[in-house]
């Protein structure tokens, strides 16, 4: 988690940050009622047996919430069950060509936004899929944008 904190710590307007993960991903029951599908997504880094998995809630609070205005985070996640691994506000539906709301109907307010910056995540598959089951990646973002005209400059 320290490396994730380092990524955003000194970021400022104009910065373009990149988070890349290729490895194992899992799901576990959601006890905070902040997931539409009832499951939290998790990454399994090489030391996860000793240090534990990294939950989507923790990724969001560590590298999404702190994003200041003018800072863009590009996340590329090649893992099973990684569709909403950053817990962002919107998920792009490729079949319908629209942004869909990713806010669950929970009792408490759920924070899935930045502090003014933009977070974009390209995931290997949807939350319910294994990465090898998918031929279409999943796009999620902290804000809606025109997918057909967006230039992804890293």
Image (cartoon, rainbow, N blue to C red):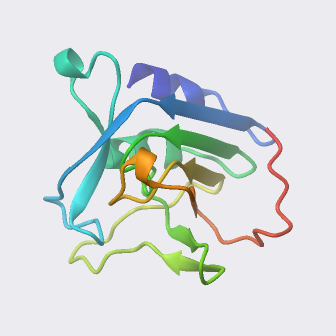
In percent of width and height, residue 139 lies at 59, 60
Residue 25, quarter of the rendered image: top left
Task: Locate the N terminus and report the quarter of the image it occupies.
Answer: top left
Q: Which residue is pictured at 66% across the width and 54% down the height?
A: 118
Up-down relation of residue 91 to residue 79 (above or below): below
Foreground pick, 47 / 72: 47
Q: Is residue 62 left or right of residue 57?
A: right
Foreground pick, 40 / 81: 81
Task: Locate the C terminus and report the quarter of the image it occupies.
Answer: top right
- The mark tally for this picture is 0
Foreground pick, 23 / 14: 23
In percent of width and height, residue 33 lies at 20, 67
Residue 13, quarter of the rendered image: top right
Q: Which residue is pictured at 49% across the width and 60% down the height?
A: 88
Q: Is residue 44 left or right of residue 21?
A: left
| Residue 80 visible to the viewer | yes
In percent of width and height, residue 23 lies at 41, 29
Up-down relation of residue 118 to residue 53 (above or below): below
Q: Which residue is pictured at 36% across the width and 49% down the height?
A: 130
Q: Which residue is pictured at 20% across the width and 77% down the height?
A: 107
Up-down relation of residue 143 to residue 42 (above or below): below
Q: Is residue 83 left or right of residue 116?
A: left
Foreground pick, 108 / 148: 148
In percent of width and height, residue 106 lies at 24, 76
| Residue 85 visible to the viewer | no
Residue 112, quarter of the rendered image: bottom left
């Amino acid at each position: 988690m320290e490396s994730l904190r380092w990524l955003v710590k000194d970021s400022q307007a104009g910065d373009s940050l990149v988070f890349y993960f290729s490895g194992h991903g899992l799901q576990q029951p959601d006890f905070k009622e902040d997931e539409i599908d009832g499951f939290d997504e998790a990454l399994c880094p090489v030391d996860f047996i000793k240090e534990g998995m990294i939950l989507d809630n923790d990724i969001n609070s560590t590298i999404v919430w702190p994003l200041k205005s003018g800072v863009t985070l590009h996340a590329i996640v090649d893992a099973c069950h990684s569709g909403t691994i950053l817990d962002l506000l919107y998920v792009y539906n490729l079949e319908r060509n629209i942004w869909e709301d990713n806010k669950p109907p929970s009792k408490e307010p759920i924070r899935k936004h930045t502090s003014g910056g933009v977070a974009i995540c390209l995931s290997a598959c949807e939350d319910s899929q294994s990465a090898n089951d998918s031929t279409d990646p999943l796009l999620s973002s902290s804000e809606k944008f025109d997918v057909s005209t967006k230039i992804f400059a890293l």
